[in-house]
Image: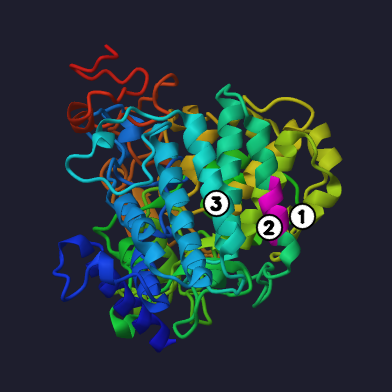
Amino acid sequence: MKSKYLSIAVLSALALASCNLDQLPKSELSPENSFSTENELKLYINGLLPQMTGSTSETADNGIRTTLPDYMTGVRSSTISAGSWSWGNLRKINIFFKYSPNCKDDNVRVKYEAMAHFLRAKFYYEKLKTFGGVPWYDIVLDDNSPELYNPRDSRDFIADKILEDLDIAILSLPQTKSINTITLWSALALKSRFCLFEGTFRKYHGLDGADRFLEQCVAASEELMASGKFSIDMTGGPSTAYRDLFAQPVTNDASPIEVINAQAYNFSLGVKHGFNYALTNPAGNKMGFEKTFVNSYLMADGSRFTDRPGFATMTFGEEFQGRDPRMAQTIAGPGFTRVGENEAVTENLTNAVTHSVTGYMPIKYYAGSLADAQNSNENDVIIYRYAEVLLNYAEAKAELGTLTQDDLDLSVKLIRDRVAMPGIDLDEANRNPDPYLAAMYPAVQGGNKGVILEIRRERRIELAMEGLRYDDIMRWKAGALFIPSFHGAYFPGTGGYDLNGDGKNEIYLYVDNRPPTPLLKGAKPLKIGLDVFLSNGTSGYLVANIDRVKSWNEQRDYLAPIPSTALVLNPNLEQNPYWDTPGNKNQ
């Protein structure tokens, strides 16, 4: 394992240096006398692998912090927090395409070119999500290239080019499983993700061509599913299997059973991240899950939590009882036990609740206590995994109107089997759509309304903190979800609260009078209006962003503005609709 991480680090350093090959003396290294052997192609491609990244964070309406992202507050503009217009990674990829013909071994060259096609598809997918149509470049530009002044290509053109790159990659990528390199399975997973995004974006935004992309999503997903290479990792059983998939033990990689690609970390080699510290440090981001996310978890028997009388005013300890086991493996709740520990420690739960702005602290990717110091995590961060492909497959078929019960049993049921949850009953879901979800997603209509809502529920739960929720909301045209106040746990008033259900109060809410002293060991007093804010003053839901005003423009905000600097440098670019930019020809 150590040698693997070391080789990745060394290769990355060498390849990053080679990104400026045209600036090096020929006697040392230059395009004309390199890219000729498999080792040189491999060195360069490995240097591009950092373009593949996973996520341990959550935004949108799932993960709430003390501050709000700019896209929720209306301050985003072409000069402030515009989307990333960086093109350096594309230049590195196109340099590879320019000089890879130096390798005369066609089999070797085609394999590594397939990896570059994958990376270019991924690059343009990110641009398409952010801006819509953008200029397409498949050559290396210099300061005098006339193509620098190209106008934007259409969304249709860019989407087709992404598909073209992915299909070329799929034909020639290696079929061996490797979580740290680009394989056939990486390309199928990316194609599944991209085509679902593009198909549903077109459907819910009223653009032509939705079905073609949804069908491509189904085909890519089916090819990966039929390979038999991956399955849902059930190691550890229903009570820990989901948690341990993300908080791997120190000596393990991400699960090769389910994980297609992951970012590798290793503490002894200095390759690490700081997820634990960001959560446990009182001065950290104080991230917490939002109330509607918590409400979305079903009961363990598959019934709807939001159908229960009084669900909206259940206290913290009550609402965890009898729920989908993934809830207690994603959010610190009663009985919370840290990875590597055998007993629940009351103080751990108290800290978790009070460190989070909503009271619902994430524990997905939360490793053992050895990782609590700054930048001390070494659990791998997942990029693509099999469960997402199964959900893509089910959603695409539901949107196409071709979903069957067998399809659900081949996809969602396998995911829920990990935690011993009942699957989705297609007929029942469509006969009785969930009114709670229907209010969240009013655009979902038709005969498959109920099952589409249930697949969206499953996706929100299963893929939380994997960096996909914002994209889902953009493609579903559901930005209105950003407008209501974000809430956390419910507290009916001042006094002590038993979080763990052990008969002891771990926190005390007060206004004027201090809580009883001495407090229990590890218990915390919280002053309403100072330490915490409640939606009804001295009672109600924790309010995370009490002093922030939200804003969402349905006509404008599903695409980011092109930065004004880019518009000045290239007057042939056109700004996205409704983004007012002084001097832009769209005014």
How far from the left and from the top, in percent, is residue 371? 35, 76
Closest to the observer: 386 or 187? Answer: 187
Q: Which mark is residue 322?
A: 2
Name which residue type carries label 3. Answer: Leu
What is the spatial separation of the Cα atoms under label 3 and label 2, in whole angstroms?
Answer: 43 Å
Q: Is residue 508 visible?
A: yes
Name which residue type carries label 2. Answer: Gly
Task: Tell me the quarter of the image containing the N terminus.
Answer: bottom left
Span highlighted in magenta in the image: 218-224
Q: Are marks 3 and 2 in contact (CB under 8 Å)?
A: no
What kind of element bears circle 1? loop
What is the spatial separation of the Cα atoms under label 3 and label 1, in whole angstroms?
Answer: 41 Å
Please report the residue visible at 54 percent of the width from the left and 74 percent of the height from the top.
Answer: 178
Residue at the disc numbered 3: 166
Residue at the disc numbered 1: 301
Q: Badge 1: how crowded within 10 Å, few (<14), some, or many (20+)?
A: few
In front: label 2 or label 1:
1
- In the drawing, does residue 235 fall left or right of residue 140? right
Q: Main secondary structure of the magenta part?
A: helix
Q: Are marks 2 and 1 in contact (CB under 8 Å)?
A: yes
